[in-house]
C-alpha cells in the first residue's frame, strides 16, 4: 500500500512585496515570478497574467502594453 501525503509549501515568515503597488504577494507567487533575488516588480493586482508570464514580474520589459495606460478607450492616459 502506498501512502501519499500532501504538504503545503513552508512559509518564510516575511511575504514578498510588489515594488510597483506595495501589496504583499504569496511565497508561491514569489518563487514562480521573482527575479531570483526575492524582488517582485509587478503583481496580479497591478499587471495582467499575460505580462507577468512574459517576465514583467521580474522586471523584464515586455512588448505587451501596460494595463494602466491602454492605447484604446482612454487615449493612453491613466484613469487616475
Image (cartoon, rainbow, N blue to C red):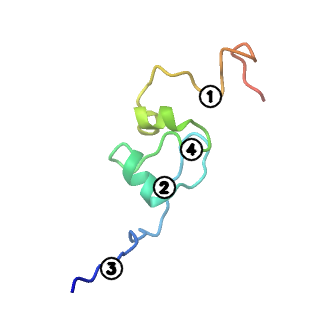
Q: Residue shown at 40%/30% (left/top)?
A: 60
Structural distance between the alpha carbons of marks 4 and 2: 13 Å
Q: Which residue is mark 3?
A: 5
List x then y, in percent, for residue 11: 43, 69
Q: Name the outermost residue toward the right.
A: 80
Q: Name the outermost residue toward the bottom.
A: 1
Circles 4 and 1: CB atoms closer than 8 Å: no
Q: Nearer the viewer, mark 3 or mark 2?
A: 3
Q: Which residue is mark 1?
A: 67
Q: Is residue 27 left or right of residue 35?
A: right
List x then y, in percent, for residue 42: 52, 40
Q: Work out whether mark 3 precedes mark 4 in sequence or the reverse, and give the earlier one.
A: 3
Q: Which residue is mark 2?
A: 16
Structural distance between the alpha carbons of marks 3 and 1: 41 Å
Q: Which mark is residue 44?
A: 4
Structural distance between the alpha carbons of marks 3 and 4: 30 Å
Q: Work out whether mark 1 precedes mark 2 in sequence or the reverse, and give the earlier one.
A: 2
Structural distance between the alpha carbons of marks 4 and 1: 11 Å
Total marks drawn?
4
The secondary structure type at the circle numbered 3 is: loop
Residue 78: name its quadrant: top right
List x then y, in percent, for residue 56: 46, 33
Amino acid at each position: 500500500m502506498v501512502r501519499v501525503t500532501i504538504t503545503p509549501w513552508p512559509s518564510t515568515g516575511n511575504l514578498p512585496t510588489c515594488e510597483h503597488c506595495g501589496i504583499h504577494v504569496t511565497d508561491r507567487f514569489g518563487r514562480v515570478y521573482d527575479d531570483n533575488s526575492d524582488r517582485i516588480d509587478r503583481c496580479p493586482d497591478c499587471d495582467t497574467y499575460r505580462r507577468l508570464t512574459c517576465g514583467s514580474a521580474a522586471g523584464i520589459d515586455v512588448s505587451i502594453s501596460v494595463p494602466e495606460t491602454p492605447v484604446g478607450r482612454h487615449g493612453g492616459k491613466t484613469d487616475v
